[in-house]
Amino acid sequence: MKTQAEQPVGKTAAWLSLSNRAIMVLSAAGIGLLYFYSVYFWDDPRRVALLFTSLAIIVWTLGAIGERKILPLSVRWNLLAAAVITVVAIVIATYFYSEFPKLIYERAGNNSTIDFVMGATVLFLVIALTWRMMGPAIPITAIVALIYAYFGPLFPGFLNHPGLSLQRILQMSAVEMQGIYGSLNATSVTLVLIFLFYGGFILGFGGLDYIIHITSRMLGKWKYGLAQVPVISSMMFGSFSGSAAANVAGTGSFTIPMMKRFGIKGETAGAIESVASSGGQVMPPVMGISAFLMAEFLGVHYIEIVMMGFAPALIFYICTGFAVFLRTKSSIDAVDRKKFSEDMASKPALEFDPVEGWPIIISLALLLLTLIFYRISVLTAGFYSIFTFLGLRAIYEFAYRRRHGSSVVSVGRKFGGNMLKGLVDGTQTMSGLMVMLGCMGIVDRVLVVTGLAQKLAFGMFDLAGGNLYFLLLLVMVVCTLFGMAISTVVSYMLVVMLAVPALQIFGIEPVVTHFVVFYIAVLAGITPPVAVACAVGASIAKASYTKTCNESMLIGAVFFIMPFSFIWYPDILKHNLGTLGAGALILVGALNVAYALNSKSGGVSSWVKRILHGAFGMVVLFPTYYWVNILAISGIAILVGLRPFWKRLTHASTGASQ
């Protein structure tokens, strides 16, 4: 019999269990609503987005009760807060959904008091919950934007504007179905959410383990391939996860200890995983969700962005793999070959069932096939891929595992549990994204309505003195600073609105600017002092954070330079015959820069060679004249041809120094 002191604990536990079940029900309702919309497309995406925004608020709130994330008080107070927020979110969704046509067509600019009350409530709720979810950076940005919108006449110089009334601020932030309910969340509904569910299902059925295993199987027999395992596995995992920190935590928990065991220093192992995982955000098809927003900004089909992104992403990973080889070769060479063979032969983690991965491969191939050749909607193609994956996975579970002695009931339970886990994971990821984008929608509207976006763009141009190189440097600094405090997708969105008009003055195409800014935004994960990917990698490797950042900067140096080459070689993004030539030149230049920064051979002659490779590589990446490019490529060819001579000279120099 429970005592009085134990009784509240029991009730609290029951409420927590009920909240977890509610999340499962809401997850099923969410994907059901999304499927219904994909079949009928019955309404304005913004109207559907407001339902998912409230759903996201409720799901996050229910999931945050046990961890006391809503309020820094006891679980009981968090339960009470969750109940209030849930009721408010339901009321807001019901009101705005039912009043949507009137708000858009009848009461536009002449809203009622209840409209403003609802707008103020959702505005406060989104900012407050984003603060609790993501920390203060994004909400403070939104609050500063709102202060700027209201107190416009008090700002000096080009920042000055007439100011907006409180009613106008509420209208543009929510009541007009813009801002919180604007294009960012509408794009999420039509393009993004389906991939969150798809990725959730893949991870729920152990997709990450399969990726790591197959990569280890492919490269583990080659001694130098060990250091390439995180590069390839992060590329594959990142192609649908899109989060650098999650990528490091997921693949790094296996790859970093493995690299350390074979003689690679902890900071180097952490850096390799950090750089490779950050690159996952530029790897199609998901590209850290930015691909969908880029498609919306540019007004093109999502698959166009995916096709543009393949060549640069492959070049990045080739150069990263080359840099990793150079930095780890001497460490791996020091490992006894016999010990290496014995350890690899006895390693149980490399044993896996290759058939298990076919549902992932076939469903992903179907996704690309339907998008590239049939050009159906992303939402519909995503559901085809999910159904294909789950169907093939069910066949695998019931047919293949049954042969290994598992009962039908146990297989069914395992399948259902994994499917539910993937569904909930996708929904919880969706909850954070929808609320964050709602908060960013406020900033977006302030920039547009006050005209600040254009003013800042011209201000950047004036600050750069009309010099393209200074302007690009300024864009890089601003984007990197934003990326240290906020996520890649938000940093990309903020900076690209400023950079596109500024760089268009120089005749640079918007699509090129979008990719340049996107790549720079991704760099924040490995850029100190706030390098989240490096922090996670250093933690797993039990290494110095500073040293891990330094190693990451060297291994990922190409990442810092390559995006700007898109301006000189725009054909790299046009997926035509010109892409082959542009890609080859960028690859040659980037490989030479990677060699210059990561080669560990010593001696004066080696330093001369590295400096020449780096200089020639930079000339190829940023050519001034056609004939200069030819001379640089000729110089690289001569350096490669003289490799035997350099080897002898290096050995002689090293011997003399000893």
Image: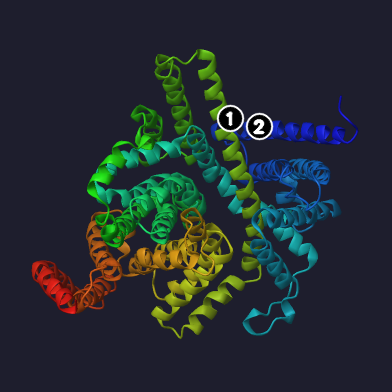
Left or right of 652? Residue 235 is right
Residue nearer the viewer, 431 or 51: 431
| Sequence-earlier tag: 2 or 1 | 2
Local crowd size for mark 2, using a 10 Å CA cut-off: few (<14), some (14–19), many (≥20): some
The reply to whether residue 437 is visible in this rendering is yes
* Point 68% across, 64% down: residue: 142
Residue nearer the viewer, 135 or 46: 135
Q: Give residue 417's position: percent from left, percent from top.
A: 57, 27
- Circles 2 and 1: CB distance less than 8 Å? yes
Q: Secondary structure at mark 1?
A: helix
Residue nearer the viewer, 521 or 277: 277
Residue nearer the viewer, 361 or 49: 361
The reply to whether residue 295 is visible in this rendering is no
Residue 386 vertical placement versus 341 (above, below) = above
Residue 543 vertical placement versus 432 (above, below) = below
Residue 37 vertical placement versus 244 (above, below) = above
Task: Check disc 1 and give the amino acid type.
Answer: Leu
Left or right of 151? Residue 459 is left
Q: Quadrant of residue 216?
A: top left
Q: Give residue 226's position: percent from left, percent from top.
A: 31, 48
| Pointer 2 residue | 24
Q: Give residue 365's position: percent from left, percent from top.
A: 36, 36
Task: Check disc 2 and give the amino acid type.
Answer: Met
Left or right of 245? Residue 80 is right
Res 420 label: 1
